[in-house]
Amino acid sequence: MKTLTLLLSLMILSCNVQKEVTKKENAQEELTVEKAVEKEVMQRDSILEKEVVQDDTTPKNENTMKQETQIEVLAQKSHGGYETSKYLVIKDHKSLQEIYGKVNRMRRPGIPVPEIDFKNEMVIALFMGEKNSGGYSIAIDKITSLSDYKVEFLLKETKPEGMATTVICQPFTFYKTLRTDKEVVFKKVE
């Protein structure tokens, strides 16, 4: 009887150990998938730290050329954005802290909040919304002045080509650019 009890105890212990090993393997697998998604997005976009985008803010005549505005990618990730598509213009430190708090709620360590000179600069936060696979991204394609009162940011969304990781993601990109007091409008381009 003691042998049978000992044998049953060993079998239960073995099952519990196997369950713990399986839990650890699943957790490791989830981390690997998240890293693979981020790597896929980074490879697909390969957006430089700093981009130069055309800005048509100068008046048009024969003697003027297009002015170029430098924008800087502050953050580009595939997880942690909003579930719905949103485009935000951030012109103060409090709003910037709130947005970084949102995207950092599940990150340890979080993405560092950058130092922004809000007198001369602003942040554009682009959230693509929830997607059912990896390989998506969103970027500023061009900045165009529509009038003395309006500036247009043309946005390009990248979709996966071929095979992509099967994971729910919420891609987003943050940019730093020169501050404008004009009304900002966003338009998707193909």
Image (cartoon, helix red, strand yellow):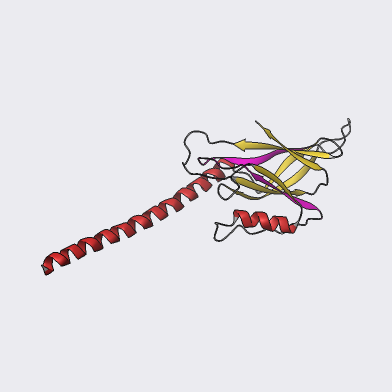
Q: Residue at x 68, y 58 (%)?
A: 97
Q: On the picture, is 167 further left or further right than 183? A: left
Along the horizontal axis of the image, is 6 left or right of 77?
left
Q: Quadrant of the N terminus?
A: bottom left
Magenta segment includes 121: yes
Q: Quadrant of the C terminus?
A: top right
Task: Please say if 134 is above or below 16.
Answer: above
Span of residues in magenta = 118-144
Quarter of the view holding residue 67: top right
Percent coordinates x, y for residue 169 in the rendering = 53, 45
Task: Report if residue 170 lies within the magenta region.
Answer: no
Of residues 33 and 60, the one drawn nearer to the viewer in this rendering:
33
Side of 57 where 188 appears, left or right: left
Residue 106 rendering spot, x and y as whole percentages = 55, 56
Q: In screen coordinates, is 35 left or right of 115?
A: left
Indicate the position of residue 81 as horizontal and vertical percent values: 60, 48
Return the x and y of residue 126 as percentages of the image width and height: 66, 44
Q: Residue at x 26, y 58 (%)?
A: 15
